[in-house]
Image (spheres, rainbow, N blue to C red):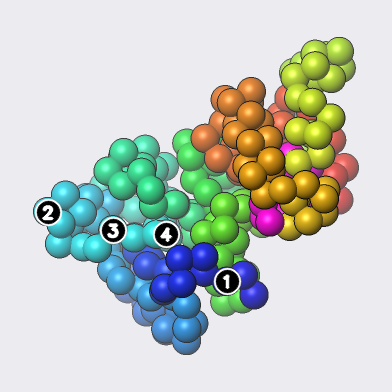
Amino acid sequence: MIENPMNRKIRIMMVEDHPEYREIVELALGKEPDMELTSQFGTTERALRSLRDRESEEPDIILLDLHLPGVSGLEAIPQLSTEIPRSKIIILTQSNREEDVLKAIMLGASGYLLKSSTVKQLTEGIRTVMEGGASLDAKLAKFVLKTLKTKLPPSEIEHLLSKRELEVLTMLAEGRVKKEIAEGLHISLTTVVSHVGHIYEKLNAPNAPAAIAKAFQLGILPISNLE
């Protein structure tokens, strides 16, 4: 179990238009000692209005459905990121369309989980994202990345990232958090953070899921890594 680094409950906001599913998630999260569902809304508009009026406490994590009435989940990602940039967004939806997954990641979502995920997968995904990792279902990622084609020739791939940066990126793609990467490579956590920052900059990616997806897309990481 990943510990909450802030030594307090993880504040979670849920934007989901089905009350029955919100209730299921509320009951599940209510059993977790380190999590608290602080607010829930049926539309993006209501969530944004509540945040702007300071009616809702700023969440650490936003669980966001894609198919919402009015402003869709995909449209909501940049709006929520602008309003509360420190909050991290995890898509929690029924959609396993390749296009939806890739768009959500590229827009800055920190994770993408299906509603068919188990309670354990959901809670572990939330903790992983809080630790700075990527919460992207491996089977779903493999499903999406099969459609991507290499865009860079091998010579350019070799010079884009350093050997150490490639090692760090590969471990990120395996779902490891920064502390685990530091231990695995026998380097300091500060050095890992520095490498991750350089990777984001070189790949023009806002977070780990986007960097991983772009790396597969460019051919920096082989799709066989997910098998």
Crowding at dot 4, Cα within 10 Å, few <14 / some 14-19 / many 20+, comes out as many
The amino acid type of the residue labelled 2 equals Asp
Q: Which residue is mark 1?
A: 3
Magenta region, residue range = 169-179
- Asked which secondary structure carries label 1, the reply is loop
Residue 187 makes an appearance in the image: yes
- Give the mark toward the camera: 3 or 1: 1
- Does 175 appear in magenta? yes
- Which of the 4 quarters of the picture holds residue 113? bottom right
Which numbered dot is residue 53?
Answer: 2
**Residue at position x 21%, y 62% in the image:** 56
Is the C-beta separation of discs 2 and 3 under 8 Å? no
The amino acid type of the residue labelled 4 equals Ile
Crowding at dot 2, Cα within 10 Å, few <14 / some 14-19 / many 20+, comes out as few
- Give the mark toward the camera: 2 or 3: 3
The percent coordinates of residue 147 (x first, y second) are 73, 34
CA gap, disc 4 and disc 1: 15 Å
The mark nearer the N terminus, 2 or 1, is: 1
Q: Which residue is mark 3?
A: 58
The percent coordinates of residue 220 (x first, y second) are 79, 28
Residue 147 makes an appearance in the image: no
Which numbered dot is residue 61?
Answer: 4
Is the C-beta separation of discs 2 and 4 under 8 Å? no
- Find the residue positioned furthest to the left: 53
Q: Main secondary structure of the magenta part?
A: helix
